Amino acid sequence: MEAYAVTPIFKGGWLIWENAEDVGMYLVCGNNRAALIDAGMGTGDLLSEISALTDLPVIPLLTHGHPDHYLGIMSCPFVFLNEKDHSLMRHYIELEAQEEGTDTPLIPKLLPLPARIDLGGLTLSTVPLCGHTQGSTGFLVEEEKVLLSGDGLIYNVWMQLDESSSLSEYRKTLENLQTFRPCFERIWTGHGIESLDASHLDRVISLLDTVIEAPFGYPNPSDEPPGIVADGAGCKITYRMDKI
Ligand SMILES: [Zn+2]
């Protein structure tokens, strides 16, 4: 099996799907520069995959600081990530080194995300998606009306982690995202081979309202961080009772 499956999703945009890990990353190419949004687990030769698609300089961007999104760019000299997730990413890198009994590896220099990136003919702008992690950030591809959301807005939003905010705080994030609603029609997430339509945002807000008012759900699978899965119509939220 190939390490990656590459699918064009708009003119200048590709989903790079990491087959072994069920995680997606995105390459967006303008006329002058390209951006890589997330990098997966690094089970294949990601840089070769990218150089087959473009010879433009590539800016590495992360939606948040979780290992399944950054491990593929550990060899890069720098990466842009919301400052609120810098310590989280360092924490996971140190944790993995401890578990493996190795020294903490050299890591890319972490730089704060710019608000807007002009790639030439395509423009990325950042929108806060804090909730899943404090620094979760989405990238709007303005000309294509696409939101690249990482894990910040996804079919099953994981809110049960220590670094996740409360459901009420996350709801405020999504309420703010509603003001950007004219800017996107499709949502491409960090763990899906198909896009979601923009109304997914309404479904998640509605499910949040239900859970906040009267928590419900079932325990999630034991191979995942413990939580309760609330299954709504077309979306799920995994959460903890101490973080409503
Ligand atoms: Zn994540």
Image: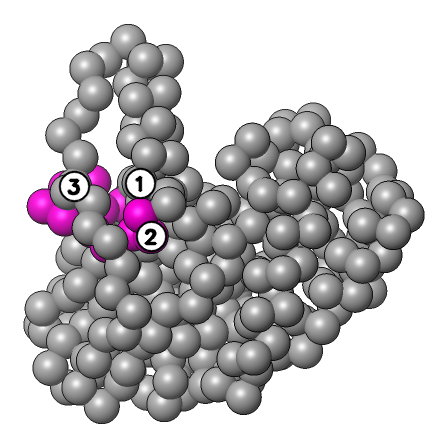
Residue 36, horizontal then vertical, whole percent:
26, 63
Q: Is residue 77 magenta?
A: yes
Q: Which mark is residue 86?
A: 1
Mark 2 crowdedness (10 Å alpha carbons): few <14, some 14-19, many ≥20: many
- Residue at the spot of label 3: 108
Q: CA distance from mark 2 to mark 1?
A: 7 Å
Residue 37, horizontal then vertical, whole percent:
32, 61
**Residue at position x 46%, y 62% in the image:** 128
Res 29 quadrant in image: bottom left
Quarter of the image with the C terminus in it: top right
- Residue at the spot of label 2: 82
**Residue at position x 9%, y 46% in the image:** 77
**Residue at position x 38%, y 35% in the image:** 88
User: Any atom of ligand 1 within 8 Å of the CB at mark 2?
Assistant: no
Give, as a three-letter code, the residue at label 2. Asn
Give, as a three-letter code, the residue at label 3. Pro
Give, as a three-letter code, the residue at label 1. His
Q: Secondary structure at mark 3?
A: loop
User: Any atom of ligand 1 within 8 Å of the CB at mark 1?
Assistant: no
Query: CB under 8 Å between callouts 1 and 3?
Result: no
Residue 63, horizontal then vertical, whole percent:
39, 56
Q: Secondary structure at mark 2?
A: loop
Residue 121, horizontal then vertical, whole percent:
22, 90
Mark 3 crowdedness (10 Å alpha carbons): few <14, some 14-19, many ≥20: some
The stretch of residues the image draws in magenta is 72-83
Res 53 quadrant in image: bottom left
Q: Nearer the viewer, residue 194 or 168?
A: 168
Q: Is residue 204 left or right of residue 18?
A: right
Q: CA distance from mark 2 to mark 3?
A: 14 Å
Query: CB under 8 Å between callouts 2 and 1?
Result: yes
Closer to the chain start, of discs 1 and 3, is: 1
